[in-house]
Amino acid sequence: MTDTGASPAGPLVTGAEIARLAGVTRAAVSNWRRRHDDFPAPAGGAANSPLYALTEVQEWLDRQRKGQEVSPEAELWQALRAAYGEQMAAGLAGVAAVLAGEDAPGLPDDVAARVRELARTAAPVDLVNGLTERFMDSARRAGSDQVTSERVVRAVCHFAPELPAGATVLDPACGIGVLLLSVAPGAGTRCHGQEADADNARFAQLRAGLLGRPRASIVAGDSLRADTWTELRADLVVCDPPAGVTEWGREELLLDARWELGTPSKAEGELAWLQHAYARTGRGGHVLMVMPASVAYRRAGRRIRAELVRRGIVRQVVALPPGTATSHALPVHLWCLRRPENGAGADTHHTVRMVDLTGNAPDGPLEPRPDQVADVPLIELLDDTVDLTPGSHLRARHRDFPDEYAALRRELGDELRRLAALLPELGPGDGAGSLDGATTSVADLARAGLVAYDGPEPVSASDQLDTDYLRGFLRNSAHARRSTSTGGTHRPDARGSRIPRMGIDDQRRYGSAFRALSAFEDGVRKVDELSRRLAEVAREGLATGGLTPRE
């Protein structure tokens, strides 16, 4: 989460929040920063993620007539950020406590007064939901995995089984309760949760009460080391467990009865969470686990995966689209388990459904097409690797090697012809070093208002300067050598660089050549990737019988 501590000017806001206040896009705010000398200077943050004083921003927006009145909810959010910084869950819990008529120790008096004032005109449930959405959006923008993303919640709800009236649902690592309360929306559902962070757990419990969920019980504590729900046998267990955590308590839990499928290694904390979730299901109960894609094939977890398959426990593995998780762009999997009805031995289920949605957009459809689904017999999975990656099983079933090979071959030929045409016509120049005489520094251009920065590379801010000309000279190998320290470390500091002085017509002539070379380099990379894919398809097609050499 972004550090947003208070400054002498009051609460600080990001560029994205300025865009939300003004009702414009983030790109518009970037343009304002470049084009308006009186735009507020950063009051904190880093160079690539500056923070601005809210009062200064609001005054500037009012002067420009681009602003709108800051909503009371937005003012409350900024006051919470100023008071709590990275501990926003504690602030949200305090707000929820005030709305629920409970004590809120630690909540500043001015914030509590704002909450009571808001509660006179807004429904408490709407207010707490609005703050929850802001908290989730803040986590998404910061790349944090502290909160289960809305996309993951949507996927789990889509693939969750239909629950009977009065069903019991458990989330043993429930965070602020978003996944738990979303997958079991009915007021009659018994919701149980546990969360290691006490502030998160308190906010989740208070929010459940404000949402009208009297049968929700969420407690603080580590579910693996100190499970509160040892006697619970749920109809559904959902979990988005901590990923990549090696200190999950393996040494003290070596003889734990929950490891009926095998004791997880220190590196396989996700499989410890999976077995914990499975241990809390009743007969016929379901488990939906959000898992990193690597858990499906890592060698350390092979024996546990084999037991899941052999006993007919794992029913479906769904590879979700890249970008579904908040903290990274890699795909995540959804493992769908079910405890056999008879309570012992394998069920009558003899296949695992593999669903590969990695080709879909993260907000695209979740209902798979026929070519994205395969029912794989258990015997095919029980090999040396027990790979549960959906894509590896779907490719072998739905691949049309002749068409794929022909299409890639055509695409490569087209790209090679296009590549040859991209190279600019270049003639002899006046010799090496002939442009080193009359030069100017990028810093001088910036001070003159001709150059702006919106990211790591400079751009032209004037019709007197061509951006492609500027970037072309900054990217050349001689400049790269000048930007490299004696220790070999590359330091691309464009502000200290110099470029030749030219009229705008000559700039555009050079810029056109540099632009063509950049397109050529992009084409070379595409040709390299196409060549690799073509060789891979040809080799696999020949090896599997999908292709054969012509006479």
Image (cartoon, rainbow, N blue to C red):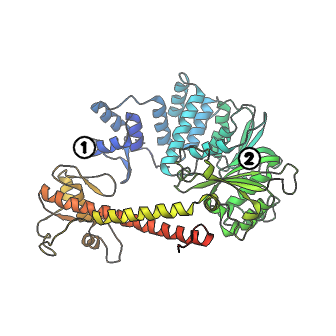
* In-front residue for pair 500/341: 341
Is 280 displayed left or right of 518 in the figure? right
Q: Find residue 35 and name its label.
A: 1
Which residue lies most toward the front here? 551
Q: Give the alpha-carbon distance from disc 2 to disc 1, as whole Å.
A: 53 Å
Identify the element where label 2 is drawn: strand
Q: Quadrant of residue 299?
A: bottom right
Please give the residue where the numbered disc 2 appears in the rendered image: 237
Is 434 displayed left or right of 43 in the figure? left
Q: Quadrant of residue 411?
A: bottom left
Residue at the spot 70% in from the left edge and 43% down from the top edge: 160
Which residue lies most toward the bottom here? 486
Is 17 displayed left or right of 95 in the figure? left
Q: Position of residue 82 (x, y in %)?
A: 46, 42
Q: Position of residue 33 (x, y in %)?
A: 29, 44
Q: Position of residue 59 (x, y in %)?
A: 32, 33
For label 1, the crowd category at 10 Å Cα-Cα, with few meaning under 14, some 14 to 19 and many 20 or more, is few
Q: Amino acid at mark 2?
A: Val
Decide: is 118 above or below 169. Answer: above
Identify the element where label 1 is drawn: helix
Q: Amino acid at mark 1?
A: Arg
Residue at the spot 68% in from the left edge and 40% down from the top edge: 183
Number of residue marks: 2
Is 25 displayed left or right of 244 in the figure? left
Residue at the spot 11% in from the left edge and 57% down from the top edge: 503
For label 2, the crowd category at 10 Å Cα-Cα, with few meaning under 14, some 14 to 19 and many 20 or more, is many
